[in-house]
Every structure is written in structure tokens, then in C-alpha cells.
Amino acid sequence: MTEGTDTGPVVLVENEGGVRIITLNRPDRLNALNETIMASLADAAADAARDGSVGCVVVTGAGRGFCAGGDLKGGAMKPQPANQDTGGRTEQGFARLRGFMETSRLLHEMPKPTIAMINGPVAGAGIGIAGACDLRFAGESASFLSAFDRIGAGGDFGSSWFWSKILGTGVARELFFLGEKLEAQAALAKGVYTRLFPDADLRAETLKAAHRLADGPRMGYRYMKANLNFAEDAQFEAALDHEALNMGLSTIATAQIYKATQEAKAQ
């Protein structure tokens, strides 16, 4: 990963069995996102998505927070002079940010479960990354803040899309327009967090669930996630067709894997 801080890589990657742990590593800035960390995070998500040995992905932050959003003090990359290839400042900025936002698409669409391990404050673009994950396990010190209203921004990293889907448009509009900070218990009550644990237990409890998923029926989870993602926008009849197709694919794959495993043990 790209070196970006005095403490080493701005994104850390660990493998624990079939679990890939991706850690944002700018603890002195509450893991705020600058261009270096966003590029490294997108690369880490892409690598986790294509690595067949990975059965579950956990995203978290170093230190006392998950992600404070964009680093407003970090400075943005200076655009190139306007040109035929990349356009002007607006086009260049769009292309750069859209590329970084592939992190959210990958976490949401990769054919394996993803968990956000929220170990403290999450705000701004961080709520998009958390929302992209299938599950959100939080510690008692976690908090949730959209924060976009504070800088006059519309929102990024899929945040408006994910939270409208997860919470419903009414609650999402409340969180975005009013910009009120939710402490951990309030966030759990609204459905922002999937589960809440004492801070000291968060990592162990998250990894216990992650290993259960990584060691479980991976083809089943692959098609289960495909069904759930499809259901977000599909008409009911189309969703039934999709489920019927994936039910056959998943059970056949699982049976074939089981047979091959048993045959290998018998040799």
C-alpha cells in the first residue's frame, strides 16, 4: 500500500483465515480521507473482491475512530490545465472522486459478505463506506453523523443511496438535512448499526461473525447477496425469477463442493 503517514501505510491489510481485514490508518486524523488513502482503499477493496481465498471482508479504522469523512485540511490534488483528454477542473475532479467511490460499489457488490467494524465516530464519506457494507457492528463509543450539511455538500460514497435503502427515505432525510449526531444506542435503535458491543469486545465479536461467514457456504452467501442486492430495486415478479434461478445455482454448487470435499478426504 502507498506510504502516506509517519506510521506506515495509510491502509493496512491483514488476512486471518478466510477473513480480509482492511484498516484505514490515519489515526491522528480520525482516518479522514485524503487522495492517498482513498486511492489505497479502492485498491484494497478491489483486491479483496477478486481474491478467491477471501470469504468475508471487514473494514475498520485505526485508533479511536472509523472514519471522520473527507480531510478538509489535507488539500486536494491540483488539476491539470484544461485539455482534450481530461477536460477542465470540473471533469477532472468528477473522474477522480468517482474512481475513489468504487470502494463503496465493491463493498456492496462483491460476491461475499462485508462488515463495517465501527470502533468510534463515523461521519461524512465514512457513512457511505459503512452503508456499503452488508453488516455494521459497532462499539459503544461509536457515533454517527452525516456532516454534509456542515460543509454545504450533497454527500458522496453512496451515502444518500445506501441510507435511503437501509433506513427508508424519511429517516435518511432526517439524518442528512438536520445533521444531528447519533450516539451508539440511538443509532442502533434507528437501525443504523446491526449490533452493538462493548468497545473491548468489538473486534473479537466482529471477527467471530466474520469467520462464521468465511467458513460457511460461500456459494450460498454469494447468491444470497445477489438476491438481496437485486431486491433493492427489482419488481417482485423479477425478484422471484432471480431467486428461483439462484436457488438452483447455489444448491448445485454447494452440493458439488461438498462432494468434492468428501472425495478428497477419502483419498
Image: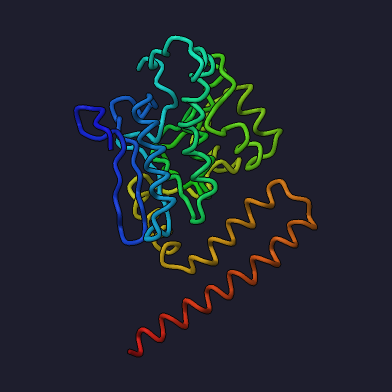
Residue 166: which quarter of the image? top right
> Which residue appears farthest toward the front when viewing the image?
84
Residue 222: which quarter of the image? bottom right
> Which residue appears farthest toward the bottom when viewing the image?
266
- Quarter of the picture containing the N terminus is top left
- Quarter of the picture containing the C terminus is bottom left
Colour approach in the figure: rainbow
The x and y percentages for residue 169 are 70, 34
- Kindly identify the residue that appears in the image at 35 percent across and 85 percent down: 265
With respect to residue 248, does 80 lie above or below? above
Q: Nearer the viewer, residue 241 or 27?
A: 241
- Kindly identify the residue that appears in the image at 58 percent across and 62 percent down: 223
All told, the count of numbered labels is 0
Q: Nearer the viewer, residue 17 or 110?
A: 110
Q: Position of 237 compared to 190: left or right?
A: right
- Kindly identify the residue that appears in the image at 41 percent across and 57 percent down: 210
With respect to residue 237, does 34 lie above or below? above
- Kindly identify the residue that appears in the image at 64 percent across and 69 percent down: 247
The x and y percentages for residue 161 are 63, 35
The x and y percentages for residue 103 are 46, 38
Q: Nearer the viewer, residue 62 or 35?
A: 35
Q: Position of 50 compared to 241: left or right?
A: left
The x and y percentages for residue 53 are 37, 61
